């Protein structure tokens, strides 16, 4: 079965598509570059499903992500589609520890999404920023005060908790 066939098969629900493609990535049956190339040609919902499959796979095995994955999801943080933004942020949160010195652009794009009107986008952004903050790299000089400000003005408790947990770990 191909990626195209998975997407065309109406009997496979969205979560099934994500887990099928995610498992292919984990088992190295599908090169991640092939999925990224496919995703680029798709409408927003299918593109988001492709990124969610990467999120699924990197949650189980972050090492499947290389620099091209980081670069891709850093770029898709600017997408108009909220689901593309939040899945991209979750991938960054999953893989940040592999690229501690290559996160400047990701941080910039994440901070631009931190005030998004969508709670899920803000939660995923908070997750990614929290994971980056916990790496305790030179980025924290700029990131720590930004996250403290975001935490103060965040009204959603779930989002706020992501920031607070990271701040506690960093300030120990």
Image: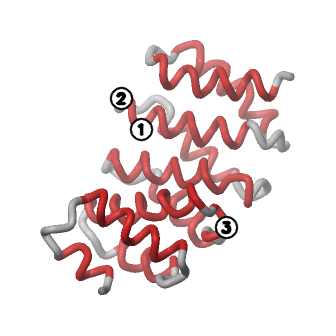
Q: Foreground mark, 1 or 3? A: 3
For the point 50% across and 25% down, which residue is it? 159
Name the foreground residue: 112 vs 135: 135
Q: Look at the numbered discs 1 and 3 and tell me whether their residues touch, using CB distance below 8 Å.
A: no
In the picture, the quarter occupied by the N terminus is: bottom left
Q: Which image quarter: residue 50?
A: bottom left
Task: Write down the residue under mark 2.
Answer: 117
Which mark is drawn over residue 121?
1
Above or below, 141 against 80 in this view is: above
Residue 75 coordinates in the image, percent (x, y): 50, 59
Whole-number angstrom distance, CA of label 1 to CA of label 3: 24 Å
Position of 41 with respect to 152 (left or right) is: left
Above or below, 95 against 110 in this view is: below
Q: Residues within 10 Å of mark 2 (few under 14, many from 20)?
A: few
| Secondary-structure class at tag 3 | helix
Task: Write down the residue under mark 3.
Answer: 63
């Amino acid at each position: 079965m191909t990626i195209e066939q998975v997407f065309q098969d109406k009997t496979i629900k969205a979560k099934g598509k994500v887990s099928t493609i995610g498992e292919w990535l984990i088992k190295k049956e599908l090169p991640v570059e092939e999925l990224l190339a496919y995703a680029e040609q798709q409408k927003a919902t299918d593109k988001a499903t492709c990124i969610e499959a990467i999120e699924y796979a990197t949650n189980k095995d972050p090492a499947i992500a290389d620099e091209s994955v980081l670069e891709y999801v850093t770029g898709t943080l600017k997408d108009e589609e909220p689901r593309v933004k939040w899945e991209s942020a979750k991938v960054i949160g999953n893989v940040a520890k592999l690229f501690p010195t290559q996160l400047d652009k990701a941080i910039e794009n994440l901070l631009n999404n931190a005030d998004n009107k969508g709670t899920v986008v803000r939660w995923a952004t908070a997750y990614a920023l929290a994971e980056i903050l916990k790496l305790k790299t030179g980025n924290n000089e700029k990131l720590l005060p930004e996250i403290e400000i975001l935490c103060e003005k965040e009204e959603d408790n779930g989002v706020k908790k992501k920031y607070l947990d990271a701040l506690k770990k960093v300030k120990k």
